[in-house]
Image (cartoon, rainbow, N blue to C red):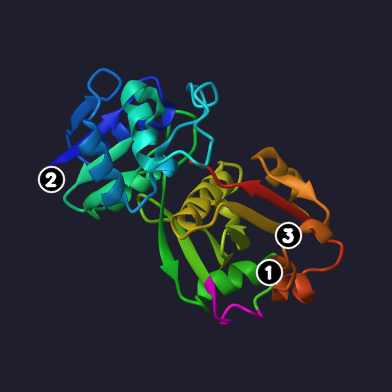
């Protein structure tokens, strides 16, 4: 398989993505896009093939984004592309191209969608986080139901419409957890997150949240919401902020979980979804 990666060697996510491609037995064509950026036309084509907006591919952190006033919503796609041509560091990374499609691989595990679905040895990223695959789970997946019930988490609404659930596995195929979301326009209500006992203490929960919120982002969500009775410290540790229940959107407050499946004492948290 031919694979191209628009790479920044100074970026951990980009380095992990490149390592994952090589872990799959593929030597990609590596383009250091800061030294050899794609043309404006090619970049626009790549963004279109990713199904993303130009603004979604702009990198904010560690770039002249603020200095250039690129947060101005009045700027056109053409103007944003011109800024990316003048300052290639504004192009978020890594962008990977294969015969299976084009993707901005954040988190790095997303590159697996573009590679052959072959059994692989487990892979640990350079920050110690284990790489995961996700696949859609049935509404009443027996393993998921058992895992949720063992933790005292709600299962009564799993078959209600508008829910999407995932099972998470290591590259060698070991199931390590489950999670799901309900989407309400720009808001994603994360739910049913459980890490299996044997997989705890390995950063699996953080990895699941990264993949789950990216799936939600690709479906249009830009803010992640959740409710918890006992894991608020964990979620705050990965960037979520506590909010007053009354400050959550009505769509979140009207969910079955908020209306009764979660106790009134549950903490409400939110986090912006950014790539």
Q: In the orientation shown, which residue stands out farthest toward the top?
A: 35
Pointer 2: what residue?
1
- Report the disc number at residue 139: none
Q: Residue at x 34, y 34 (%)?
A: 81
Q: State left or right for residue 249 relative to residue 169.
A: right
Q: State left or right for residue 20 relative to residue 232.
A: left
The tag earlier along the polypeptide, 1 or 2, is: 2
Pointer 1: what residue?
251
Q: Position of residue 9 (x, y in %)?
A: 34, 21
Q: Are marks 1 and 2 in contact (CB under 8 Å)?
A: no
Crowdedness near tag 3: few (<14), some (14–19) or many (≥20) residues, C-alpha within 10 Å:
many
Q: Residue at x 68, y 69 (%)?
A: 251
Image position of 222 with respect to 157: above or below: above
- Measure the alpha-carbon separation of dots 2 and 3: 43 Å
Q: Which residues are magenta?
A: 156-163
Is residue 106 visible in the rendered structure shown here?
no
Residue 109 in which image quadrant? top left
Image position of 162 with respect to 85: above or below: below
Pointer 3: what residue?
227
Crowdedness near tag 2: few (<14), some (14–19) or many (≥20) residues, C-alpha within 10 Å:
few
Q: Position of residue 233 (x, y in %)?
A: 75, 44
Crowdedness near tag 1: few (<14), some (14–19) or many (≥20) residues, C-alpha within 10 Å:
some
- Measure the alpha-carbon separation of dots 1 and 3: 14 Å
**Which of the pair 185/81 is nearer the observer?**
81
The tag earlier along the polypeptide, 2 or 3, is: 2
Q: Secondary structure at mark 2?
A: loop
Q: Position of residue 132 (x, y in %)?
A: 42, 49
Q: State left or right for residue 267 relative to residue 130.
A: right
Q: State left or right for residue 213 relative to residue 57.
A: right
Q: Secondary structure at mark 1?
A: helix
| Main secondary structure of the magenta stretch | loop
């Amino acid at each position: 398989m031919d694979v191209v990666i628009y790479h920044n060697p100074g970026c951990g996510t980009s380095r992990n993505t490149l390592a994952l491609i090589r872990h799959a037995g593929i030597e990609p064509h590596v383009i250091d896009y800061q030294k050899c950026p794609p043309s404006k036309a090619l970049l626009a084509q790549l963004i279109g093939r990713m199904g993303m907006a130009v603004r979604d591919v702009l990198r904010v952190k560690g770039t002249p984004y603020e200095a250039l006033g690129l947060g101005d919503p009045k700027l056109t796609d053409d103007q944003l592309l011109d800024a990316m041509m003048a300052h290639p560091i504004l192009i978020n990374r890594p962008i990977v191209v294969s015969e299976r499609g084009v993707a901005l691989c954040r988190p790095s595990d997303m590159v697996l969608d573009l590679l052959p679905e072959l059994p692989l040895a487990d892979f640990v990223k350079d920050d110690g986080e284990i790489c995961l695959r996700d696949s859609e789970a049935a509404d009443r997946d027996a393993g998921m139901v058992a895992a949720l019930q063992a933790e005292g988490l709600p299962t009564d609404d799993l078959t209600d419409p508008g829910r999407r659930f995932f099972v998470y596995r290591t590259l060698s195929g070991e199931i390590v957890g489950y999670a799901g979301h309900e989407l309400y326009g720009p808001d994603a209500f994360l739910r049913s997150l459980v890490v299996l006992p044997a997989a705890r203490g390995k950063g699996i929960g953080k990895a699941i949240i990264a993949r789950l919120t990216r799936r939600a982002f690709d479906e249009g969500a830009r803010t992640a919401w959740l409710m918890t009775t006992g894991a608020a410290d964990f979620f705050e540790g990965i960037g979520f902020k506590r909010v007053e229940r009354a400050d959550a959107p009505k769509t979140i407050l009207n969910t079955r979980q908020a209306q009764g499946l979660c106790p009134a004492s549950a903490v409400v948290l939110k986090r912006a979804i950014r790539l």
